Image: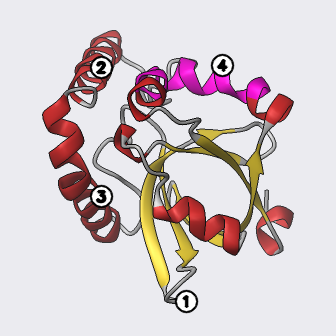
Amino acid sequence: MKSGISAACFRPSACYTSRVLKRLLQWLVTTDWFTRIGPKIIPPLDRAVHRLTRGRLMSNSRIIPTLVLTTTGRKSGLPRRTPLACLPEPDGGLLVVGSNFGTASHPAWSANLLATPSARVSFRGRDFPVTATLLTGEERAAVWPRLIAMWPVFDHYTAKSGRELRVFRLTPSGAAQEGR
């Protein structure tokens, strides 16, 4: 699980296939053409797969843990659904990174969380409320190596974007906390 490969990887051949797919995907997402095309294709594809499987599956969930984050649009006030890679924490929290495919600007969902930290997450077939906290300084530095171990592409995106990528901890709130 350290490499982010699915816990369902019981057969050696399946594990090997997952590792190869992960490396291929990591290379693909660092290409210039993917940075231009990926944001137009991947989020709508992930949302469709998520909707069709009732939240149990995402297009790349066998390679990297993925969730759908629903924020409140800071300008529109409307719900905004965004598929994101995540790092589950032992206490039930989830870490997400505002990489925006390595572009120079922060993703809109991160600005939405800064304005309204209450959100919803759909992860592995469960839907629950969360409270988002922007990690800075020592807190961010403490989790960054784990995020890089899961998805080394975040370092490439940092260099390419010329900005510090925002890292948020999504903490289950309300009844979701009690059900853990």
Q: What residue is disc 4 on?
A: 145
Identify the residue at horizontal 29%, vertical 17% (top origin).
23
Q: Look at the numbered disc 2 and give the secondary structure of its residue.
A: helix
Asked whether, in this view, residue 139 is left or right of residue 148, the answer is right
Q: Main secondary structure of the magenta part?
A: helix
Name above or below for residue 32 compared with residue 15. Answer: below
Q: Look at the numbered disc 3 and give the secondary structure of its residue.
A: helix
Where residue 79 sits in the image (x, y, percent)?
50, 83
The amino acid type of the residue labelled 1 equals Gly
Q: Is residue 154 magenta?
A: yes
Q: Which tag is nearer the camera, tag 2 or tag 4?
A: 4
Q: CA distance from mark 2 to mark 4?
A: 26 Å
Q: Could you say which disc has been placed on residue 43 in the image?
A: 3
Q: Could you say which disc has been placed on residue 77 in the image?
A: 1
Residue extending farthest to the bottom is 77
The amino acid type of the residue labelled 4 equals Pro
The amino acid type of the residue labelled 2 equals Ala
Q: Residues within 10 Å of mark 1 (few under 14, many from 20)?
A: few
Please identify the quarter of the rendering in which residue 64 is found: top left
Q: Could you say which disc has been placed on residue 14 in the image?
A: 2
Identify the residue at horizontal 26%, vertical 15% (top origin).
20
Q: Which tag is nearer the camera, tag 2 or tag 1?
A: 1
